[in-house]
Structure formats: structure tokens, C-alpha cells
Image: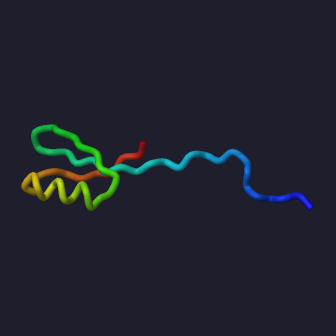
Amino acid sequence: MACNCGGGARAPQPIVVYELTLPDGTVRRYFTYQEADAANKRAGSTGVISTAVQ
């Protein structure tokens, strides 16, 4: 009996990153929302966090 082990080519999973945009135009990328939120709080909670796909 043939094995159905899933050895075929698979589409790569997109990577979601969180971008923190600060009022001065600086954009920083983080891999978790918690990191972006913590950086935003350190910057005075004036930035905007959005998601981006790489």
C-alpha cells in the first residue's frame, strides 16, 4: 500500500509581522504584538500598530 506521508511541495506560510509607526515617521517591525505594544508604550503610546504580511 502506498504511503500518504505528505512529502509533496507545500506553499510557504506567510509571515505576519507587526509594524509600529511612530509620529516622526519611523517604522519598526516586530514578530509579536506584545513586542510592538511594549515598544509603543516605551515611546509614550503615541504610535500606531498594524499588521503586515511578508
- Please give the name of the residue rendered at 16% of the width and 54% of the height, measured from the top-left corner: 40
Q: Residue at x 42, y 42 (%)?
A: 54
- Count of numbered labels shown in the rendering: 0
In the picture, which quadrant includes the N terminus?
bottom right
Vertical side of 11 occupied by 35: above or below: below
Q: Residue furthest left?
A: 44
Display colour scheme: rainbow
Residue at x 10% of width, y 52% of height: 43
Residue at 7% of width from left, 55% of height from top?
A: 44
In which quarter of the view is residue 34 placed?
bottom left
Provide residue 17's location: percent of width, then percent of height: 35, 49
Q: Nearer the viewer, residue 16 or 5?
A: 5
**Outermost residue, right direction?**
1
Left or right: where does residue 17 sit relative to residue 24?
Answer: right
> In the rendered view, does 35 fall on the left or right side of 13?
left
* Residue 14: image location, x then y, percent: 49, 48
Please name whichever residue, 5 or 14, is drawn nearer the observer in this view of the structure. 5
Q: Residue 2, located in which quarter of the rendered image?
A: bottom right
The image quarter containing residue 27 is: top left
Task: Please provide percent x and percent y for residue 37.
Answer: 21, 59
- Report the front residue among 31 and 47: 31
